[in-house]
Amino acid sequence: MKLKSLAPILYIIFLMLPIYWLLSMSFKTTNEILSGFSFFPQEWTLENYAVIFNDPTWYWGYINSTTYVLINTVISLCVALPAAYAFSRYRFMGDKHLFFWLLTNRMAPPAVFALPFFQLYSAVGLFDTHIAVALAHCLFNIPLAVWILEGFMKSIPKELDETAYVDGYSFPRFFVTIFMPNIKAGIGVAAFFCFMFSWVELLLAKTLTSIDAKPIAATMTKTASSAGYELGLLAAAGCLTIIPGAIVVYFVRNHIAKGFAMGRV
Amino acid sequence: MKTENPRAWLLVLPVILLVAFNALIPLMTVVNYSVQETFGNNVFFWQGVDWFEQVLHSERFHDALGRQFLFTGIILAVEIPLGVAIALAMPRKGIWVPVCLILMSLPLLIPWNVVGAMWNIFTLPDIGLMGYGLNWLGIDYNMTQSPLAAWVTLIIMDVWHWTSLVVLLSYAGLVSIPDAYYQAAEIDGASKWSVFRYIQLPKMKQVLMIAILLRFMDSFMIYTEPFVLTGGGPGNSTTLLSIDLVKVALGQFDLGPAAAMSLIYFAITLLVSWVFYTIMNKDVKE
Protein backbone atom coordinates (compact mmCIF):
# COMPACT_ATOMS: atom_id res chain seq x y z
CA MET A 1 0.00 0.00 0.00
CA LYS A 2 1.29 3.38 -0.94
CA LEU A 3 1.82 6.15 1.57
CA LYS A 4 -0.48 8.34 -0.48
CA SER A 5 -3.56 6.31 0.33
CA LEU A 6 -2.98 6.95 4.00
CA ALA A 7 -4.59 10.42 3.82
CA PRO A 8 -8.05 9.25 2.66
CA ILE A 9 -7.95 6.37 5.14
CA LEU A 10 -7.13 8.65 8.06
CA TYR A 11 -9.80 11.08 6.91
CA ILE A 12 -12.44 8.34 6.73
CA ILE A 13 -11.47 7.12 10.19
CA PHE A 14 -11.91 10.68 11.46
CA LEU A 15 -15.34 10.79 9.81
CA MET A 16 -16.41 7.46 11.25
CA LEU A 17 -15.39 8.05 14.88
CA PRO A 18 -18.31 10.29 15.94
CA ILE A 19 -20.72 8.08 14.00
CA TYR A 20 -19.30 4.99 15.74
CA TRP A 21 -19.71 6.70 19.09
CA LEU A 22 -23.34 7.51 18.38
CA LEU A 23 -23.94 3.92 17.27
CA SER A 24 -22.25 2.45 20.32
CA MET A 25 -24.21 4.78 22.63
CA SER A 26 -27.45 3.64 21.08
CA PHE A 27 -26.75 0.03 22.10
CA LYS A 28 -25.82 0.86 25.68
CA THR A 29 -28.20 0.77 28.61
CA THR A 30 -28.86 4.01 30.47
CA ASN A 31 -27.10 2.53 33.49
CA GLU A 32 -23.97 1.84 31.54
CA ILE A 33 -23.93 5.33 30.02
CA LEU A 34 -24.29 6.94 33.42
CA SER A 35 -21.72 4.69 35.08
CA GLY A 36 -18.80 5.95 33.03
CA PHE A 37 -16.63 5.60 29.97
CA SER A 38 -16.58 2.37 27.95
CA PHE A 39 -15.36 1.97 24.40
CA PHE A 40 -17.65 -0.96 23.50
CA PRO A 41 -21.12 -1.53 24.90
CA GLN A 42 -20.77 -3.99 27.80
CA GLU A 43 -24.31 -5.32 27.64
CA TRP A 44 -25.83 -4.94 24.21
CA THR A 45 -29.39 -3.77 24.34
CA LEU A 46 -32.03 -2.96 21.73
CA GLU A 47 -34.21 -1.27 24.30
CA ASN A 48 -33.57 2.23 22.91
CA TYR A 49 -34.71 1.17 19.47
CA ALA A 50 -37.68 -0.66 20.90
CA VAL A 51 -38.87 2.55 22.57
CA ILE A 52 -38.74 4.39 19.26
CA PHE A 53 -40.58 1.74 17.27
CA ASN A 54 -43.32 1.41 19.88
CA ASP A 55 -44.01 5.07 20.58
CA PRO A 56 -46.12 6.86 17.95
CA THR A 57 -44.67 10.30 18.78
CA TRP A 58 -41.29 8.87 17.79
CA TYR A 59 -42.07 6.85 14.71
CA TRP A 60 -44.53 9.41 13.37
CA GLY A 61 -41.62 11.83 13.38
CA TYR A 62 -39.90 9.65 10.79
CA ILE A 63 -43.07 9.28 8.74
CA ASN A 64 -43.64 13.05 8.79
CA SER A 65 -40.09 13.85 7.77
CA THR A 66 -40.11 11.34 4.95
CA THR A 67 -43.49 12.61 3.72
CA TYR A 68 -42.54 16.25 3.37
CA VAL A 69 -39.12 15.38 1.94
CA LEU A 70 -40.72 13.25 -0.78
CA ILE A 71 -43.36 15.88 -1.60
CA ASN A 72 -40.64 18.50 -1.80
CA THR A 73 -38.46 16.38 -4.10
CA VAL A 74 -41.35 15.77 -6.49
CA ILE A 75 -42.43 19.43 -6.60
CA SER A 76 -38.86 20.68 -7.00
CA LEU A 77 -38.10 18.33 -9.87
CA CYS A 78 -41.38 18.94 -11.71
CA VAL A 79 -40.91 22.70 -11.86
CA ALA A 80 -37.12 22.73 -12.15
CA LEU A 81 -36.95 20.43 -15.19
CA PRO A 82 -38.65 22.76 -17.71
CA ALA A 83 -36.96 25.82 -16.19
CA ALA A 84 -33.50 24.26 -16.43
CA TYR A 85 -34.27 23.34 -20.05
CA ALA A 86 -35.16 26.94 -20.81
CA PHE A 87 -31.95 28.22 -19.19
CA SER A 88 -29.76 25.70 -20.98
CA ARG A 89 -31.29 26.10 -24.46
CA TYR A 90 -32.70 29.58 -24.89
CA ARG A 91 -31.86 33.22 -24.46
CA PHE A 92 -34.74 35.32 -23.21
CA MET A 93 -35.33 38.63 -21.56
CA GLY A 94 -33.65 38.81 -18.16
CA ASP A 95 -32.41 35.21 -18.18
CA LYS A 96 -29.07 35.92 -16.50
CA HIS A 97 -30.60 38.11 -13.81
CA LEU A 98 -33.28 35.55 -13.20
CA PHE A 99 -30.70 32.81 -12.76
CA PHE A 100 -28.79 34.85 -10.19
CA TRP A 101 -32.02 35.83 -8.42
CA LEU A 102 -32.85 32.14 -8.08
CA LEU A 103 -29.42 31.53 -6.60
CA THR A 104 -29.81 34.37 -4.11
CA ASN A 105 -32.57 32.35 -2.50
CA ARG A 106 -30.07 29.63 -1.82
CA MET A 107 -28.13 32.34 0.05
CA ALA A 108 -31.00 33.49 2.26
CA PRO A 109 -30.26 32.51 5.85
CA PRO A 110 -33.23 30.42 7.09
CA ALA A 111 -33.02 32.31 10.37
CA VAL A 112 -34.04 35.47 8.47
CA PHE A 113 -37.14 33.81 7.06
CA ALA A 114 -38.27 31.75 10.03
CA LEU A 115 -40.73 34.24 11.49
CA PRO A 116 -42.22 35.59 8.21
CA PHE A 117 -42.62 32.00 7.01
CA PHE A 118 -44.55 31.15 10.13
CA GLN A 119 -46.87 34.11 9.54
CA LEU A 120 -47.25 33.44 5.82
CA TYR A 121 -48.13 29.78 6.19
CA SER A 122 -50.44 30.48 9.12
CA ALA A 123 -52.21 33.11 7.02
CA VAL A 124 -52.84 30.72 4.13
CA GLY A 125 -53.97 28.02 6.54
CA LEU A 126 -51.19 25.55 5.83
CA PHE A 127 -49.47 25.71 9.21
CA ASP A 128 -48.57 22.28 10.61
CA THR A 129 -49.09 20.42 7.32
CA HIS A 130 -46.54 18.43 5.34
CA ILE A 131 -47.18 20.53 2.28
CA ALA A 132 -46.14 23.71 4.14
CA VAL A 133 -42.68 22.33 4.93
CA ALA A 134 -42.38 20.89 1.43
CA LEU A 135 -43.20 24.27 -0.12
CA ALA A 136 -40.92 26.17 2.25
CA HIS A 137 -37.99 23.91 1.40
CA CYS A 138 -38.58 24.73 -2.27
CA LEU A 139 -37.01 28.09 -1.45
CA PHE A 140 -33.53 26.61 -1.54
CA ASN A 141 -34.14 23.28 -3.31
CA ILE A 142 -35.61 24.65 -6.55
CA PRO A 143 -32.65 26.97 -7.24
CA LEU A 144 -30.30 24.10 -6.50
CA ALA A 145 -32.21 21.67 -8.73
CA VAL A 146 -32.30 24.21 -11.57
CA TRP A 147 -28.56 24.78 -11.20
CA ILE A 148 -27.69 21.07 -11.25
CA LEU A 149 -30.08 20.14 -14.07
CA GLU A 150 -28.92 23.05 -16.20
CA GLY A 151 -25.34 21.83 -15.83
CA PHE A 152 -26.27 18.32 -16.95
CA MET A 153 -28.47 19.55 -19.82
CA LYS A 154 -25.73 21.76 -21.22
CA SER A 155 -23.68 18.66 -22.03
CA ILE A 156 -26.47 17.21 -24.24
CA PRO A 157 -25.89 18.41 -27.83
CA LYS A 158 -28.58 20.63 -29.27
CA GLU A 159 -28.77 18.49 -32.40
CA LEU A 160 -30.77 15.98 -30.36
CA ASP A 161 -33.58 18.52 -29.89
CA GLU A 162 -33.46 19.68 -33.49
CA THR A 163 -33.60 16.16 -34.95
CA ALA A 164 -36.58 15.32 -32.79
CA TYR A 165 -38.46 18.44 -33.86
CA VAL A 166 -37.72 17.66 -37.52
CA ASP A 167 -39.09 14.16 -36.93
CA GLY A 168 -42.33 15.78 -35.81
CA TYR A 169 -42.12 15.36 -32.07
CA SER A 170 -44.08 17.87 -30.02
CA PHE A 171 -42.20 19.55 -27.21
CA PRO A 172 -43.81 17.66 -24.30
CA ARG A 173 -43.45 14.31 -26.08
CA PHE A 174 -39.81 15.01 -26.97
CA PHE A 175 -39.06 16.17 -23.45
CA VAL A 176 -40.51 13.13 -21.70
CA THR A 177 -39.62 10.32 -24.13
CA ILE A 178 -36.26 11.47 -25.50
CA PHE A 179 -34.72 14.24 -23.44
CA MET A 180 -35.40 13.01 -19.92
CA PRO A 181 -33.92 9.52 -20.46
CA ASN A 182 -30.78 11.28 -21.72
CA ILE A 183 -30.30 13.18 -18.50
CA LYS A 184 -31.36 10.36 -16.15
CA ALA A 185 -28.17 10.76 -14.15
CA GLY A 186 -28.78 14.47 -13.73
CA ILE A 187 -32.36 13.91 -12.58
CA GLY A 188 -31.17 11.28 -10.12
CA VAL A 189 -28.53 13.58 -8.72
CA ALA A 190 -30.92 16.54 -8.49
CA ALA A 191 -33.45 14.34 -6.68
CA PHE A 192 -30.70 13.21 -4.33
CA PHE A 193 -29.76 16.79 -3.50
CA CYS A 194 -33.36 17.88 -2.94
CA PHE A 195 -33.87 14.89 -0.69
CA MET A 196 -30.68 15.58 1.19
CA PHE A 197 -31.16 19.29 1.84
CA SER A 198 -34.79 18.84 2.79
CA TRP A 199 -33.91 15.95 5.08
CA VAL A 200 -31.15 17.76 6.97
CA GLU A 201 -32.91 21.13 7.39
CA LEU A 202 -34.50 21.70 10.75
CA LEU A 203 -35.07 25.38 11.50
CA LEU A 204 -37.86 25.94 8.94
CA ALA A 205 -39.34 22.48 9.39
CA LYS A 206 -39.58 23.08 13.12
CA THR A 207 -41.00 26.58 12.75
CA LEU A 208 -43.77 25.48 10.40
CA THR A 209 -45.04 22.50 12.36
CA SER A 210 -46.38 21.78 15.81
CA ILE A 211 -47.97 18.34 16.16
CA ASP A 212 -49.39 16.76 13.02
CA ALA A 213 -46.38 17.21 10.78
CA LYS A 214 -43.60 17.44 13.33
CA PRO A 215 -40.28 16.22 11.88
CA ILE A 216 -38.18 13.61 13.64
CA ALA A 217 -35.43 16.14 14.25
CA ALA A 218 -37.83 18.29 16.28
CA THR A 219 -38.97 15.28 18.28
CA MET A 220 -35.35 14.71 19.15
CA THR A 221 -34.76 18.26 20.37
CA LYS A 222 -37.84 18.04 22.57
CA THR A 223 -36.60 14.79 24.12
CA ALA A 224 -33.18 16.24 24.67
CA SER A 225 -34.57 19.15 26.64
CA SER A 226 -37.55 17.62 28.43
CA ALA A 227 -36.49 14.16 29.54
CA GLY A 228 -33.21 15.18 31.14
CA TYR A 229 -31.08 13.91 28.31
CA GLU A 230 -31.80 10.26 27.69
CA LEU A 231 -28.59 9.83 25.79
CA GLY A 232 -29.14 6.25 24.64
CA LEU A 233 -32.55 7.05 23.21
CA LEU A 234 -31.26 10.20 21.55
CA ALA A 235 -28.36 8.26 20.03
CA ALA A 236 -30.69 5.57 18.69
CA ALA A 237 -32.96 8.18 17.12
CA GLY A 238 -29.92 9.88 15.62
CA CYS A 239 -28.64 6.62 14.13
CA LEU A 240 -32.00 6.01 12.48
CA THR A 241 -31.86 9.43 10.79
CA ILE A 242 -28.62 8.44 9.05
CA ILE A 243 -30.17 5.43 7.29
CA PRO A 244 -32.32 7.19 4.62
CA GLY A 245 -29.33 9.29 3.53
CA ALA A 246 -27.13 6.22 3.32
CA ILE A 247 -29.74 4.48 1.15
CA VAL A 248 -30.18 7.31 -1.35
CA VAL A 249 -26.45 7.98 -1.63
CA TYR A 250 -25.95 4.34 -2.62
CA PHE A 251 -28.14 4.81 -5.69
CA VAL A 252 -26.27 7.82 -7.02
CA ARG A 253 -22.77 6.69 -6.00
CA ASN A 254 -21.42 6.73 -9.55
CA HIS A 255 -22.64 10.23 -10.29
CA ILE A 256 -22.21 11.81 -6.92
CA ALA A 257 -18.90 13.53 -7.68
CA LYS A 258 -20.30 15.08 -10.83
CA GLY A 259 -23.46 15.98 -8.95
CA PHE A 260 -21.59 17.85 -6.26
CA ALA A 261 -19.88 19.78 -9.05
CA MET A 262 -23.43 20.80 -10.12
CA GLY A 263 -22.91 18.92 -13.39
CA ARG A 264 -20.23 21.42 -14.34
CA VAL A 265 -17.21 19.25 -15.05
CA MET B 1 -25.24 28.68 -29.45
CA LYS B 2 -28.44 29.43 -27.61
CA THR B 3 -31.39 30.69 -29.60
CA GLU B 4 -33.50 33.69 -28.75
CA ASN B 5 -36.91 32.52 -27.54
CA PRO B 6 -39.19 34.78 -25.51
CA ARG B 7 -41.63 31.92 -24.95
CA ALA B 8 -39.01 30.23 -22.79
CA TRP B 9 -40.45 32.42 -20.05
CA LEU B 10 -43.41 30.05 -19.92
CA LEU B 11 -41.09 27.20 -18.98
CA VAL B 12 -39.57 29.23 -16.17
CA LEU B 13 -42.85 30.63 -14.90
CA PRO B 14 -43.75 27.86 -12.39
CA VAL B 15 -40.34 28.19 -10.77
CA ILE B 16 -40.69 31.96 -10.54
CA LEU B 17 -44.17 31.76 -9.02
CA LEU B 18 -43.20 29.18 -6.44
CA VAL B 19 -39.95 30.82 -5.41
CA ALA B 20 -41.51 34.26 -5.41
CA PHE B 21 -44.26 33.05 -3.07
CA ASN B 22 -41.59 31.77 -0.72
CA ALA B 23 -39.09 34.56 -1.13
CA LEU B 24 -40.81 37.84 -1.94
CA ILE B 25 -43.72 37.73 0.50
CA PRO B 26 -41.56 36.91 3.54
CA LEU B 27 -38.96 39.40 2.38
CA MET B 28 -41.60 42.14 2.17
CA THR B 29 -42.79 41.18 5.66
CA VAL B 30 -39.27 41.63 6.96
CA VAL B 31 -38.90 44.97 5.18
CA ASN B 32 -42.22 46.05 6.70
CA TYR B 33 -41.15 45.22 10.23
CA SER B 34 -37.79 46.85 9.76
CA VAL B 35 -39.26 50.34 9.36
CA GLN B 36 -42.01 50.14 11.98
CA GLU B 37 -42.46 50.00 15.72
CA THR B 38 -45.16 47.89 17.35
CA PHE B 39 -46.54 47.59 20.86
CA GLY B 40 -48.53 44.46 20.06
CA ASN B 41 -52.17 44.14 18.97
CA ASN B 42 -51.10 44.65 15.37
CA VAL B 43 -50.72 48.41 15.84
CA PHE B 44 -47.74 49.73 13.93
CA PHE B 45 -46.01 53.09 13.82
CA TRP B 46 -43.68 54.40 11.16
CA GLN B 47 -40.14 54.31 12.45
CA GLY B 48 -38.00 55.09 9.41
CA VAL B 49 -34.44 53.83 9.41
CA ASP B 50 -34.00 54.03 13.19
CA TRP B 51 -33.72 50.29 13.62
CA PHE B 52 -31.02 50.08 11.00
CA GLU B 53 -29.01 52.78 12.73
CA GLN B 54 -29.52 51.12 16.07
CA VAL B 55 -28.38 47.73 14.78
CA LEU B 56 -25.43 49.10 12.82
CA HIS B 57 -24.20 50.97 15.88
CA SER B 58 -24.81 48.24 18.43
CA GLU B 59 -21.79 46.55 19.89
CA ARG B 60 -23.66 43.28 20.14
CA PHE B 61 -24.15 43.18 16.37
CA HIS B 62 -20.51 44.09 15.71
CA ASP B 63 -19.37 41.28 17.99
CA ALA B 64 -21.64 38.71 16.37
CA LEU B 65 -20.59 39.85 12.90
CA GLY B 66 -16.91 39.71 13.88
CA ARG B 67 -17.32 36.18 15.24
CA GLN B 68 -19.18 35.19 12.08
CA PHE B 69 -16.40 36.42 9.78
CA LEU B 70 -13.75 34.81 11.97
CA PHE B 71 -15.62 31.51 11.91
CA THR B 72 -16.20 31.57 8.14
CA GLY B 73 -12.58 32.62 7.52
CA ILE B 74 -11.16 29.76 9.58
CA ILE B 75 -13.58 27.30 7.99
CA LEU B 76 -12.54 28.28 4.46
CA ALA B 77 -8.83 28.32 5.35
CA VAL B 78 -8.99 24.80 6.80
CA GLU B 79 -11.55 23.00 4.65
CA ILE B 80 -10.49 24.12 1.17
CA PRO B 81 -6.78 23.06 1.32
CA LEU B 82 -7.61 19.93 3.31
CA GLY B 83 -10.34 18.94 0.86
CA VAL B 84 -8.07 19.45 -2.16
CA ALA B 85 -5.26 17.46 -0.52
CA ILE B 86 -7.54 14.51 0.24
CA ALA B 87 -9.02 14.58 -3.26
CA LEU B 88 -5.51 14.47 -4.75
CA ALA B 89 -4.65 11.43 -2.63
CA MET B 90 -7.82 9.50 -3.51
CA PRO B 91 -7.69 6.58 -5.94
CA ARG B 92 -9.03 7.38 -9.43
CA LYS B 93 -10.17 3.90 -10.39
CA GLY B 94 -11.11 0.63 -8.81
CA ILE B 95 -13.55 -0.76 -6.29
CA TRP B 96 -12.44 1.59 -3.52
CA VAL B 97 -13.71 4.68 -5.31
CA PRO B 98 -17.45 4.19 -4.61
CA VAL B 99 -16.65 3.02 -1.07
CA CYS B 100 -14.67 6.19 -0.41
CA LEU B 101 -17.34 8.38 -1.98
CA ILE B 102 -20.20 6.84 -0.03
CA LEU B 103 -18.38 6.94 3.31
CA MET B 104 -17.26 10.49 2.72
CA SER B 105 -20.76 11.68 1.81
CA LEU B 106 -22.27 10.27 5.00
CA PRO B 107 -21.70 13.36 7.20
CA LEU B 108 -23.44 15.51 4.59
CA LEU B 109 -26.60 13.41 4.88
CA ILE B 110 -27.13 13.64 8.61
CA PRO B 111 -29.74 16.14 9.85
CA TRP B 112 -27.97 19.17 11.22
CA ASN B 113 -29.32 18.91 14.73
CA VAL B 114 -28.24 15.26 14.85
CA VAL B 115 -24.75 16.45 13.88
CA GLY B 116 -24.84 18.83 16.82
CA ALA B 117 -26.19 16.19 19.18
CA MET B 118 -23.67 13.63 17.93
CA TRP B 119 -20.76 15.96 18.63
CA ASN B 120 -22.25 16.86 21.96
CA ILE B 121 -22.18 13.19 22.96
CA PHE B 122 -18.76 12.70 21.34
CA THR B 123 -17.17 15.53 23.31
CA LEU B 124 -18.71 14.96 26.76
CA PRO B 125 -15.74 15.17 29.16
CA ASP B 126 -16.72 12.10 31.17
CA ILE B 127 -18.25 9.67 28.69
CA GLY B 128 -17.55 11.08 25.20
CA LEU B 129 -14.79 9.49 23.17
CA MET B 130 -13.10 12.78 22.27
CA GLY B 131 -13.73 14.53 25.58
CA TYR B 132 -12.61 11.54 27.63
CA GLY B 133 -9.65 10.93 25.34
CA LEU B 134 -8.37 14.49 25.56
CA ASN B 135 -8.70 14.61 29.32
CA TRP B 136 -6.99 11.22 29.55
CA LEU B 137 -4.09 12.68 27.57
CA GLY B 138 -3.84 15.37 30.22
CA ILE B 139 -5.41 18.17 28.22
CA ASP B 140 -7.98 19.98 30.31
CA TYR B 141 -10.97 19.96 28.01
CA ASN B 142 -14.48 21.10 28.80
CA MET B 143 -16.47 22.74 26.07
CA THR B 144 -19.11 24.20 28.36
CA GLN B 145 -16.60 26.18 30.37
CA SER B 146 -13.79 27.26 28.08
CA PRO B 147 -14.60 29.52 25.12
CA LEU B 148 -11.45 28.33 23.36
CA ALA B 149 -12.48 24.68 23.68
CA ALA B 150 -15.95 25.59 22.40
CA TRP B 151 -14.48 27.30 19.33
CA VAL B 152 -12.07 24.46 18.59
CA THR B 153 -14.90 21.93 18.91
CA LEU B 154 -17.16 24.01 16.68
CA ILE B 155 -14.48 24.20 13.99
CA ILE B 156 -13.57 20.51 14.17
CA MET B 157 -17.26 19.70 13.93
CA ASP B 158 -17.69 21.84 10.83
CA VAL B 159 -14.54 20.38 9.27
CA TRP B 160 -15.96 16.94 9.97
CA HIS B 161 -19.34 17.90 8.56
CA TRP B 162 -18.41 19.77 5.38
CA THR B 163 -14.86 18.99 4.21
CA SER B 164 -16.32 16.09 2.21
CA LEU B 165 -18.16 18.59 0.04
CA VAL B 166 -14.84 20.15 -0.96
CA VAL B 167 -13.30 16.69 -1.46
CA LEU B 168 -16.14 15.57 -3.72
CA LEU B 169 -16.08 18.77 -5.77
CA SER B 170 -12.30 18.70 -6.24
CA TYR B 171 -12.43 15.02 -7.02
CA ALA B 172 -15.05 15.64 -9.72
CA GLY B 173 -12.67 18.17 -11.27
CA LEU B 174 -9.71 15.79 -11.06
CA VAL B 175 -11.37 12.77 -12.68
CA SER B 176 -12.37 14.93 -15.64
CA ILE B 177 -8.69 15.33 -16.61
CA PRO B 178 -7.87 12.98 -19.54
CA ASP B 179 -5.02 10.51 -18.98
CA ALA B 180 -3.23 11.96 -21.99
CA TYR B 181 -2.46 15.12 -20.02
CA TYR B 182 -0.57 13.14 -17.39
CA GLN B 183 1.27 11.11 -20.02
CA ALA B 184 2.36 14.30 -21.76
CA ALA B 185 3.55 15.69 -18.42
CA GLU B 186 5.52 12.53 -17.76
CA ILE B 187 7.24 12.70 -21.14
CA ASP B 188 8.18 16.31 -20.45
CA GLY B 189 9.58 15.25 -17.09
CA ALA B 190 7.29 17.59 -15.19
CA SER B 191 7.64 17.63 -11.40
CA LYS B 192 4.74 16.73 -9.14
CA TRP B 193 4.32 20.39 -8.28
CA SER B 194 4.11 21.53 -11.89
CA VAL B 195 1.57 18.79 -12.66
CA PHE B 196 -0.51 20.17 -9.82
CA ARG B 197 0.07 23.81 -10.69
CA TYR B 198 -0.41 23.64 -14.48
CA ILE B 199 -2.71 20.65 -15.04
CA GLN B 200 -4.73 19.82 -11.93
CA LEU B 201 -5.31 23.24 -10.43
CA PRO B 202 -6.64 24.88 -13.63
CA LYS B 203 -9.03 21.95 -14.08
CA MET B 204 -10.21 22.25 -10.50
CA LYS B 205 -10.56 26.02 -10.59
CA GLN B 206 -14.21 26.11 -11.52
CA VAL B 207 -15.35 23.44 -9.09
CA LEU B 208 -13.23 25.04 -6.39
CA MET B 209 -15.05 28.32 -6.94
CA ILE B 210 -18.34 26.48 -6.44
CA ALA B 211 -16.88 24.89 -3.31
CA ILE B 212 -15.80 28.26 -1.92
CA LEU B 213 -19.14 29.84 -2.80
CA LEU B 214 -21.14 27.03 -1.18
CA ARG B 215 -18.91 26.85 1.88
CA PHE B 216 -19.07 30.61 2.31
CA MET B 217 -22.86 30.72 2.03
CA ASP B 218 -23.49 27.76 4.30
CA SER B 219 -20.97 28.61 6.99
CA PHE B 220 -22.26 32.18 7.02
CA MET B 221 -25.82 30.97 7.58
CA ILE B 222 -24.93 28.23 10.06
CA TYR B 223 -27.46 27.95 12.86
CA THR B 224 -28.57 24.50 13.94
CA GLU B 225 -25.23 22.80 14.63
CA PRO B 226 -23.72 25.46 16.93
CA PHE B 227 -27.12 25.99 18.52
CA VAL B 228 -27.35 22.33 19.49
CA LEU B 229 -23.65 21.98 20.30
CA THR B 230 -22.96 25.06 22.41
CA GLY B 231 -26.16 27.11 22.37
CA GLY B 232 -23.96 30.13 21.64
CA GLY B 233 -22.02 29.72 24.87
CA PRO B 234 -20.13 29.73 27.11
CA GLY B 235 -21.30 33.28 27.60
CA ASN B 236 -21.66 34.72 24.12
CA SER B 237 -18.41 33.31 22.82
CA THR B 238 -19.93 31.19 20.03
CA THR B 239 -23.02 33.31 19.33
CA LEU B 240 -22.80 33.58 15.55
CA LEU B 241 -25.06 35.87 13.53
CA SER B 242 -27.95 33.45 13.00
CA ILE B 243 -28.03 32.46 16.64
CA ASP B 244 -28.05 36.08 17.72
CA LEU B 245 -30.79 36.87 15.22
CA VAL B 246 -33.06 34.08 16.46
CA LYS B 247 -32.41 35.19 20.05
CA VAL B 248 -33.57 38.71 19.20
CA ALA B 249 -36.49 37.71 16.96
CA LEU B 250 -38.03 34.76 18.77
CA GLY B 251 -36.50 35.10 22.23
CA GLN B 252 -37.12 38.78 22.90
CA PHE B 253 -39.70 39.26 20.12
CA ASP B 254 -38.08 42.58 19.12
CA LEU B 255 -39.46 42.42 15.62
CA GLY B 256 -38.15 45.77 14.39
CA PRO B 257 -34.49 45.36 15.29
CA ALA B 258 -34.61 41.67 14.32
CA ALA B 259 -35.96 42.56 10.89
CA ALA B 260 -33.39 45.29 10.36
CA MET B 261 -30.68 42.86 11.42
CA SER B 262 -32.05 40.22 9.02
CA LEU B 263 -31.84 42.61 6.10
CA ILE B 264 -28.30 43.73 6.90
CA TYR B 265 -27.30 40.09 7.36
CA PHE B 266 -28.89 39.05 4.06
CA ALA B 267 -27.30 42.02 2.28
CA ILE B 268 -23.81 41.06 3.46
CA THR B 269 -24.32 37.45 2.38
CA LEU B 270 -25.59 38.58 -1.02
CA LEU B 271 -22.75 41.02 -1.56
CA VAL B 272 -19.96 38.54 -0.82
CA SER B 273 -21.69 35.76 -2.78
CA TRP B 274 -22.19 38.11 -5.72
CA VAL B 275 -18.46 38.88 -5.75
CA PHE B 276 -17.64 35.15 -5.79
CA TYR B 277 -20.28 34.48 -8.44
CA THR B 278 -18.96 37.24 -10.72
CA ILE B 279 -15.37 36.01 -10.43
CA MET B 280 -16.60 32.48 -11.11
CA ASN B 281 -18.45 33.43 -14.30
CA LYS B 282 -15.61 35.64 -15.51
CA ASP B 283 -13.25 32.69 -15.34
CA VAL B 284 -15.63 30.52 -17.31
CA LYS B 285 -15.79 32.97 -20.17
CA GLU B 286 -12.04 33.37 -20.48
Image: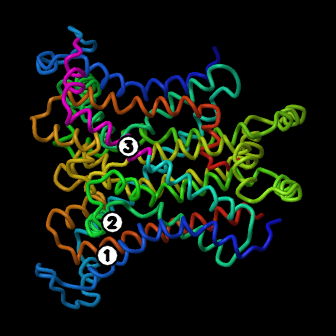
| Residue placed most toward the observer, A172 or B220 | A172
Residue range corresponding to the magenta coloring: A45-70
Kind of residue at disc 3: Thr
Q: Residue at x 71, y 36 (%)?
A: B175
**Same chain? Circles 2 and 1:** no
Subunit of mark 2? A
Q: Is residue A156 left or right of residue B217?
A: right
Residue A161, horizontal then vertical, whole percent:
81, 56
Could you tell me the amino acid type at mark 1? Val
Circle 1 SS class? helix
| Residue at screen point 37% across, 54% down | A131
- First in sequence, mark 2 or 3: give its number: 3
Secondary structure found at label 3: helix
Q: Quadrant of the N terminus of chain A?
A: top right
The vertical placement of A214 against B268, above or below, is: above
Q: Which residue is mark 3?
A: A67
Q: Are marks 3 and 1 on the same chain?
A: no
Q: Which mark is residue B30?
A: 1
